[in-house]
Image: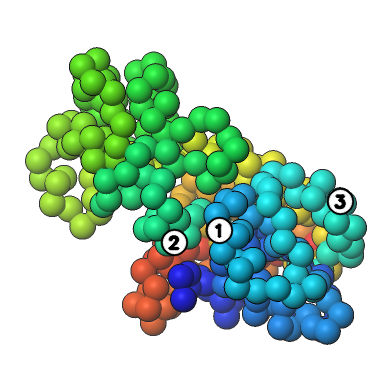
Amino acid sequence: MIHKPVLLKEVLEYLKPKAGENFIDCTVGFGGHAIPILKRIMPNGRVLGIELDEAVLEKLQSQISNKRLILVQGSYADLERVAKKNNFYPVNGILFDLGISSWQIEKSGRGFSFLRDEPLDMRSDKGSRLTAEEIVNQWPEKELVRIFQEYGEERFARRIADSICWVRKNSLIKTTQQLVEAVQRAVPAKYRYRRIHFATRIFQALRIAVNDELNNLKEALPQALEILKKDGRLTVISFHSLEDRIVKNFFREAARKDFLKILTKKPVGPDLEEIKLNPRSRSAKLRAGVKI
Ligand code: SAH
C-alpha cells in the first residue's frame, strides 16, 4: 500500500458511519479512510472526497471507481462550495487528515524531503504559483525569519535566514540539498547529530507557507460545522502543534457557543503498535465533536 491510514480505528469510532449516510473526506489522499467509510455507508450512502493534489487524485481514480464515491480536485478551503456544487446533503460526518502523505514526501519529486535531492517546489497544487524556490531566493530576510519562527518554531530562525541570504547572493538555491547545506552552515554542530534532522522545521515552515496550510484550515473548519447536519460528526487529525492549536481553539470556541459538543477532552494519539507499524502516525492528534 502506498499510504497507511493514520488512526483508522479511531476515525471510524468517532465518525460512526452507517448504511445510507453521507461523509466528506476533505483530504481523501489514497482513500485510506474514505474506502473503509465507503464500505460502511453502502449501498445507499455517499462519500465526497476532496483532494488538492492532482497526481494523488489520479492515482486514487486509477485504483477505485465506485459511483458512491465522488472525487473532486480542489481545496478544502472551498468546502461549502464543493458540497453545494455536488448537491451533497445531508452531511453526517466530515474528516480532515491534514498534512501530506508519505507518497508525496518520498515519490512526488517535489522537494518535500530533506533526505532527497530534488527541485525546491513543495506545491501540493500544481496550479498555484508560489514555490519554495521563490520563497527561499526572493523573499526578504525578515520574512524568512518570520516563517521559520512562526511556521517552523525554529530556534535558529535568524541564523538560518542569514545563512540563506548569504548563499543566495552568490548563487540561487534551487535544490533541497543546496537548502540543507545553507541550513547546516547556520546550526550549531551538535544539532547535526540529533534524532530529528536539523532541517525538519525549515522544510515544514516552507511547506506551510507555499500551500498556505494554516489559513486554509482556519477557513475550512467553520464551513465544516456549517454544512454538517445536527448530530453530524467532525473529526480532525493534525500533525504538528500549529495545526492542533487551530483545531483546539476552534473546537473550544464552537463548544462555548453551544454549536459543538467535544468528544475528545484530550486529543487522541496512536498506540505504540501503530507507531511501530507507521512512523507517520507518531505525531498524530485526533479531535472529534458532534454538531449540536
Ligand atoms: N487520509 C488519506 C491521507 C491524507 S494525507 C489516506 O489515508 O489515504 C493529506 C492529503 O491532503 C494529501 O493527499 C494532500 O495532498 C491533501 N491536501 C493538502 N492540502 C489540501 C487542501 N487544502 N485541500 C484538499 N486536500 C489537501
Instruction: Classify 10 Å Cα crowding around label 2: few (below 14), some (14-19), many (20 and above).
Output: some
- Ligand 1 contact, mark 1 (Cβ < 8 Å): yes
Q: Is residue 285 above or below residue 144?
A: below
Amino acid at circle 1: Val
Report if residue 201 is visible in the image. Answer: no
Q: Is residue 280 left or right of residue 212?
A: left
- Ligand 1 contact, mark 3 (Cβ < 8 Å): no
Contact, CB < 8 Å: mark 3 with mark 1?
no
Q: Is label 2 in a helix, a strand or a loop? A: helix
Distance from disc 3 to disc 1, alpha carbons, whole Å, reads 22 Å
Amino acid at circle 3: Lys
Residue 8 found in image quarter:
bottom right
Instruction: State the residue at coordinates (50%, 41%).
Output: 123
Task: State the residue lying farthest toward the front.
Answer: 62
Distance from disc 1 to disc 2, alpha carbons, whole Å, reads 9 Å
Q: Is label 1 in a helix, a strand or a loop? A: helix
On the image, the x and y values in percent for residue 278 come to 39, 73
Q: Which residue position is annotated with label 1? A: 56
Q: Which residue position is annotated with label 2? A: 103
- Chain-order first, disc 1 or disc 2: 1
On the image, the x and y values in percent for residue 114 come to 28, 47
Q: Which residue position is annotated with label 3? A: 85
- Chain-order first, disc 3 or disc 1: 1
Contact, CB < 8 Å: mark 1 with mark 2?
yes
